[in-house]
Amino acid sequence: MGDVLSTHLDDARRQHISERTGKILTEFLRFYEDQYGVALFNSMRHEIEGTGLPQAQLLWRKVPLDERIIFSGNLFQYQEDNKKWRNRFSLVPHNYGLVLYENKVAYERQVPPRAIINSAGYKILTSVDQYLELVGNSLPGTSSKSGTAPILKCPTQFPLILWHPSARHYYFCMMTEAEQDKWQAVLQDCIRHCNNGIPENSKVEGPAFTDAIRMYRQSKELYGTWEMLCGNEVQILSNLVMEELGPELKAELAPRLKGKPQERQRQWIQISDAVYRMVYEQAKARFEAVLAKLQLARPAMEATIRTDMDQIITSKEHLASKIRAFILPKAEVCVRNHVQPYIPSILEALMVPTSQGFTEVRDVFFKEVTDMNLNVINEGGADKLGEYMEKLSQLAYHPLKMQSCYEKMEPLRLDGLQQRFDVSSTAVFKQRAQIHMREQMDNAVYTFETLLHQELGKGPTKEELCKSIQRILERVLKKYDYDSSSVRKRFFREALLQITIPFLLKKLAPTCKSELPRFQELIFEDFARFILVENTYEEVVLQTVMKDILQAVKEAAVQRKHNLYRDSMVMHNSDPNLHLLAEGAPIDWGEEYGGSMGDNGSPSVPEAATHSEKRRRAKQVVSVVQDEEAELSFEAGSEPLSPASPDSVTELRGLLAQDLRAESPPPAGPLLNGAPSQESPQPTAASEASSPPASPLRQPPPGKAADLEPPKPSDQETGEQVSSPDGRPPIHTTTEDSAGVQTEF
């Protein structure tokens, strides 16, 4: 690998890449600085005018469910350096970064992880053929001929491959189809979460960044949706640079790659990943510097806006009226001829799978609460309630139970419309709807928790408790129906705008865009940071099509098959005291209603240990799946499983229980989305010998739980580093010797 990079990425080419990246970043960051002032003004105006969404009926968690493990288990990972498959203990913490350890013992001993994979921008592939097709398309002229060895061979029929257009690829395989399905659901949840990397509560920086991305790409005559708008700001910015830089490098370097087709493919993947890392580091430094500068200037900008708010609004409305008079005739004709006839078709294509998905969310929530109520009846009333509610509280984060909801979006197609409106992929709409589903499920669960907790304060009998659960369930479902209707209608409006506005802007650009500079003189110099001609022009275009979109959604609400509330049906303060309940401290069900019997019906261990064990156990959202006595059938050149890597479900569950008793939470460092992962070296045999093994029977003494926490790894994507045992800086290029220990070049 080192020879490939040193040959094709010498100092001169690295300098060229750095200069080219710097030029792209400089151009983009000018757009970002311009959009920052506009976003700040819009945010402050929104706060003052109070034009908001309908009041939600469901509560939402103000304190997120942290310190939970989404999933943990063993899988086989392909090591590219020595071309061997190794068994890894893998863990997905609450921040959805896949963490790979040498084995379960290494995790318990707090040995730094082998790798942390941030999955934003990745795609999951379930067959080697799919992967080979994508790799072949990424480097023209390298498609493997029949009879030649492919770039990757999988020893089982159940691979999972994480593919990224620019960054490193990751190869895993499982022993059974059930394992593959479960890991696929878990990893897809990781991708879904990490792709949504810009915080929803970012009212200035987030909108400024996404608007700057759109404006920059439109300046390059790139309209329509962009599939790589995923991850955090630095991740997206790296994708933006690679969108321009990648094809240039490919054209320059592809003819110089030597060897058989699969070898040239492997070389290109290594080169692309190395360039992506370089771009990421440069983008991170530049973006953080500009953001810090803007945040320093923000107080002065806010003071100006507060002082001159009325004048800024008046100036903007005057500008909008002039632009409207100029473009309205052209825009209305364009909407009438090219957009309006297709709105019902687009809306119907969106509504069917989305409504089915939200209906499935309702059904899953109803089933889980009903099953819990039956268990309360059959197993002793409130004694087991704490355990059941701990599990229910994490329902929205259970990839497998939510999978039936997410799957409803998969049939979404815009056949015939994608080409017309330049929609590169429907993935962005699927993912957005799935995120709304998860949010609404969590809101329903949290509202149910809050109301049930209030009811338990009255000391109900078992019969009264069961009736109360049923009554609260019906009450929450009514609120869910209203909120899900509001969320879906907002999603439909946003999706229609996201599809039609770029199309309209592209259509109007030849006749309108060149005339926009003459409107600049209508803006006072003092207000130029808060009013931009280009933004005002887009708002006017949006207004020309918004009336048709609102009318289409309103008419769709009348159709009962979509289960939407009409706009005239508004629930105002239907439950005014409910929101007051959410102001209290978060509910700890395991602590308050832990019960007096163990999980198997036997007397529990002492109370303090019981609470601790139940809380730790509940934090594993998905249970481990592993076949008994499973072994991987290795091909020539691979090695048998390490004895230190447990394979049987009994061993894994035993070690997991030991881990939970030891109160060892997962790595909690913030994980950014989808940039290259950082691997860290493992300690030598001597250092491992000096670290005593954790006792499976020992309970941590009070106050020592924090000492047993594994390191909080962080990776290069997020600007933080996985710590090395000897304090050395993180390594970028690693290999494994015959003992499986990573060493630095």
Image (tube, rainbow, N blue to C red):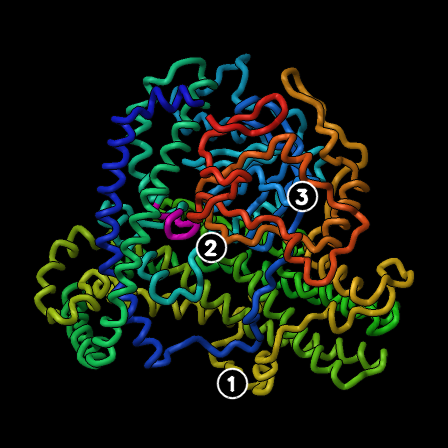
In front of the other: label 2 or label 1?
Answer: 2
Please tell me whether mark 2 sits on a helix, a strand or a loop.
loop
- Please give left or right for residue 107 compared with residue 320 in the image: right
Write down the residue under mark 3.
109
CB within 8 Å, label 1 to label 3:
no
In front of the other: label 2 or label 3?
Answer: 3
Quadrant containing the N terminus is top left
Write down the residue under mark 2.
196
- Please give left or right for residue 88 compared with residue 516 in the image: right
Determine the image quadrant of residue 357: bottom right
Magenta-drawn stretch contains 343: no
How crowded pointer 1 is (Cα within 10 Å; few <14, some 14-19, many 20+) is rated as few
* Residue occupying the point 11% across, 64% down: 520
| Between 297 and 662, the one nearer to me in the picture | 662
Between the C-alphas of marks 2 and 3, the distance is 33 Å
Query: Which kind of residue does numbered mark 3 sit on?
Result: Arg
* Residue occupying the point 37% across, 57% down: 498
Determine the image quadrant of residue 105: top right
Examine the rendering and report whether any part of residue 404 can be seen.
Answer: no
* Residue occupying the point 48% across, 81% down: 568
Write down the residue under mark 1.
572
Query: Which kind of residue does numbered mark 1 sit on?
Result: His
Please tell me whether mark 3 sits on a helix, a strand or a loop.
loop
Between the C-alphas of marks 2 and 1, the distance is 31 Å
